[in-house]
Image (spheres, helix red, strand yellow):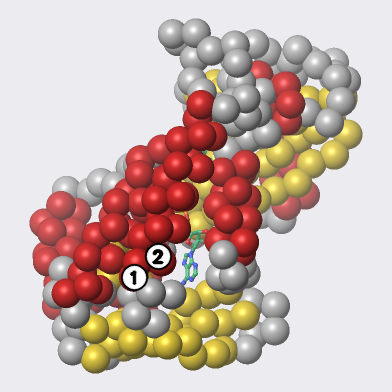
Amino acid sequence: MTTNLFEKYLNIFIQIIHNWFTSKSFTSNVSSNQVLYPKKGSGQFYKGIAHYICSQNQQVLLDTEVVQVKHNSFLINELVLKNLHTGQEEAHKCRGVISSIPINLLLQKLSPSPPERILNLVKYLKFRNTILAYLIIEGNQIFPEHSLYINDKSVQVVRVTNFANWSPDILPNCYQTPLCCEYWCDFNESIWQLSDQEILVQAEQELREIGLLAQQTVSSGFVVRLARTHPIYTVNYQTALLEIQDYLKQFQNLQIVGRGGSFSYFDQDMVLLMGMSSAKDLLNSLKAL
Ligand SMILES: Cc1cc2nc3c(=O)[nH]c(=O)nc-3n(C[C@H](O)[C@H](O)[C@H](O)COP(=O)(O)OP(=O)(O)OC[C@H]3O[C@@H](n4cnc5c(N)ncnc54)[C@H](O)[C@@H]3O)c2cc1C
């Protein structure tokens, strides 16, 4: 795609985001202490973005891992991508990269590799993982809040979300409620090693123990494991991050975005804005090359 075309598409895309926020796709019962929320959940955004990209004859590759980021004197010219279904790897030429993968992983994928000193700093940028245990409850009006933080040492669950209260349009019917129990942990913690079934049993037991579930039955559930969701701000992280960012600034066609990419505790609104401004910055730097 030429730079001008890309710029045109970017502006149309920004308009789409604006229209979403002002359209009927958002819950209408918004008052001063409520947030605007897409009626079908925030996945609406990402499906819309993917749809828009495909409509412009561009590709969105899901279940694909970036295994290598090749560069020549700090100019990225090729990505090696692995299809996670077939295991097949393929090299793709590229002019510019906006990376939202965790910053420590990006450094390890650069080829040629960064200096040893930079790679050693990665140990100061650690993340926590999240396990999401979704339980389908037979019943409605389980509790009135959107999400509850659980501060109770007798259980491991840290947050419980009731999607019925985010937007009723998410629900498939009026007699079941999906609840999500969150567990934050490291890779080596015992809960990360449990099977999905064991996690679901634990989540149900804990909801009963803290009184969020009473007589209602749990008819089914599923588990989603998300690696590296929360950057950990340790004593030395800022110094290490600054040095890594200075190193990455030398790349002429690379923009770093997102929560894991920038190692900052950003929410979705912030990372969407970051993505848009990084696209503009990348276009400008490509013009200068
Ligand atoms: C449980 C939970 C609840 C949250 N609730 C809210 C909320 O209510 N509102 C809100 O605004 N924010 C919320 N957040 C925060 C929000 O999810 C993040 O701000 C947002 O997802 C960050 O987007 P991102 O693109 O930076 O990172 P991510 O969404 O984490 O995307 C990074 C992607 O990179 C992929 N990746 C990693 N390595 C590679 C590789 N080598 N090759 C290819 N892909 C790779 C990962 O699989 C991931 O899909 C929540 C987060 C969690 C964990």
Q: Position of residue 19 (x, y in %)?
A: 51, 34
**Residue at mark 1 to residue at mark 2: CA–CA distance:** 5 Å
- Position of the N terminus, as image quadrant, is bottom left
Residue closer to the observer: 212 or 166: 166
Q: Is mark 2 within 8 Å of ligand 1?
A: no
Q: Position of residue 151 (x, y in %)?
A: 48, 23
Per the image, the residue denoted by label 2 is: 6
Q: Count of labels shown?
A: 2
Residue type, mark 2 in image: Phe
Which x, y percent locates residue 95?
Answer: 34, 80
Q: Residue drawn 46% across and 81% down?
A: 67
- Disc 1: which residue: 3
Position of 36 relative to 13 (above/below): above
Residue at 54 percent across and 90 percent down: it is 90
**Which residue lies at the image location 49% right of the left edge and 14% below the top edge?**
34
Is residue 4 shown to the viewer in this render? Answer: yes
- Residue 20 or 258: which is nearer the viewer? 20
Secondary structure type for disc 1: helix
Against 285, residue 221 (above or below) is: above
Look at the numbered disc 2 and give the secondary structure of its residue: helix
Which percent across, then down, holds residue 224?
65, 51
Left or right side of 219 for 68: left
Q: Is residue 32 left or right of residue 266?
A: right
Mark 1–mark 2 CB contact (< 8 Å) = yes
Quarter of the figure with the C terminus: bottom left
In the rendering, which numbered label is found on residue 282?
none
Q: Is residue 157 visible?
A: no
